[in-house]
Amino acid sequence: MLKRRDLLKYAAGSFAAAATLDAPFALAQGAAAPAIEPTPAQFDPASVVDLARALSKKPYKAPNSALPEGFANLSQDAYAGIRAKPENKIWATENTGFVLEPLHRGSVFAAQMGVSIIENGFERRLAYSPDLFDFGKITPPANVGDIGFSGIRLSVPFEGELREVAVFQGASFFRARASFQLFGTVARGLSIRTADPRGEETPAFRQVWIEKPNLATNAIVIHALLDSESVTGAYRFTMRPGDATIIDTECTLFARVNVDHYGLATMASTFVYGPLDRRRDDIRPSVHEIGGLQILNGNDEWIWRPVSNRETLQASAFVDTNPKGFGFLQRERNFGAYQDDVAHWEWRPSLWIEPIGEWGAGEVTLVEIPSESEVNDNMVAYWRPKAPLTAGAEASFAYRQFWCWQAPSRPALAQVAVSRSGRSTGGQPGGKRRRFLVDFAGDIFSDPQRTQEITPNLTASPGTISSVRSFLDRDRKSMRVIFDMDAGADAWSELRLVLESQGKPISETWLYRWTP
């Protein structure tokens, strides 16, 4: 049996070898450790930055994603059945607080990701062998050779079991979750030209270096090299799992060419339908991983933008300078809102981003993509800097991710609890006159001094608003606003609603784009 100590091979000069890209990130050959191991390569985090910089000065070379036939055409179930054998998981018998599992290549995860372990300041390259894996119901091809890995899975010991906390796999995609959650929203290291008519470019993590964790810190550090046609990048992720899993992200980007449309802190999630757009004949009341996009802009305005599964692709830009936070949130945590005993949408994480340092001018971009599938991540959000990356330029950013039940930053204002829409009384089926209901909730409604003469400040552009009614319930600490909107001859309308008392906002700002 292949032992875990045989998996980690010292790899001298790995940074220099990777920089050439003549044989991209080739892993050590063979399943057994050599009789005499070469001198290990000393690891310096700055070397990842140097490697990304050197790589940006070379022409892009796409990674080789070819796989043996037995792995290239696996069904989803067959691929999901391939797992690392428990005895071959890294740190499984050590008291480090984390367990690392290399992930097999196959199906949609064909690209290779180099994996190295950092211990005592030295780098060791993880070598592939079929003996590492339990292949489930399939028989692996003979004489596979060293095909590498597609990514990594990180777990934490919990009550005698391993609980998965994060997965880095596929392009620059990764996902995490808090305690007792299911995986949901996906993050990306970088997005380029998302929903752009010129076509999207997909950067990928070509190599990761994982520092051996220390139980006392409850943290693990992952370094990553990103590569694409237009940009290279050096990343450092510091992850701390818990009731909220926190990932501090630091990145330095290097432009091969001029890049005028790129996204930081990109996230993608699933939204099929909800109370605002029930166009699907389904026994479940709602199907979504997130309910909306929350933004705390540079002017300290709190914005809640419910997302929607549109008939056509929609992109919205929330122009800002030095944003203080944004993210996809799942606010509805009641099982009754979904009635799904399998998917449990109420257990999916919210993902909140807090920039570290000033990001300058730009916009939070929201892309809503039509979808009928529950496995499509059809909602995308990211920060798009106004300043482009020019060829040869370098740019550094940092931000903190909270994978959580509720965002750590919340306004001392009433928040939107429910948004609904339906045909207005007297309106024609499929017509442009719609009725909306927005429920706000918060302790502020129990304080008569702070909520005198509450006025809904409500606008539609284009379109007209009528039949506005509001209902305050101090016992339930809530206020409901119902109104009709008529878009007239227009095929869309931007709606804005905020509750005010004595000329000051007492609620977050509700924004919504209506389309037929």
Image (cartoon, grey):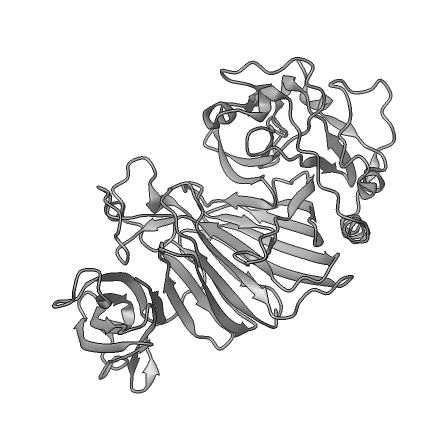
**Residue extending farthest bottom:** 502
* Whether residue 391 is visible: yes
- The one nearer the camera, 432 or 27, is 432
Query: In the drawing, does residue 396 fall left or right of residue 166?
Result: right
The total of numbered circles placed on residues is 0
Write the residue at 79% across / 43% down.
Answer: 43
Write the residue at 71% across / 57% down.
Answer: 252
Q: Classify 111 as above or below 256.
A: above
- Residue 477, percent from left and from top: 22, 67
Write the residue at 43% across / 57% down.
Answer: 313
Q: Quadrant of residue 373?
A: top left
Q: Quadrant of the C terminus?
A: bottom left
Write the residue at 87% across / 28% down.
Answer: 38
Query: In the drawing, does residue 89 fall left or right of residue 230?
Result: left
Q: Classify 304 as above or below 44.
A: below
- Residue 484, percent from left and from top: 21, 72
**Residue extending farthest left:** 426
Query: In the drawing, does residue 27 fall left or right of residue 293?
Result: right
- Residue 132, percent from left and from top: 63, 20
* Whether residue 87 is visible: no
Q: Classify 472 as above or below 63.
A: below
- The one nearer the camera, 263 or 507, is 263
Query: In the drawing, does residue 485 fall left or right of residue 102?
Result: left
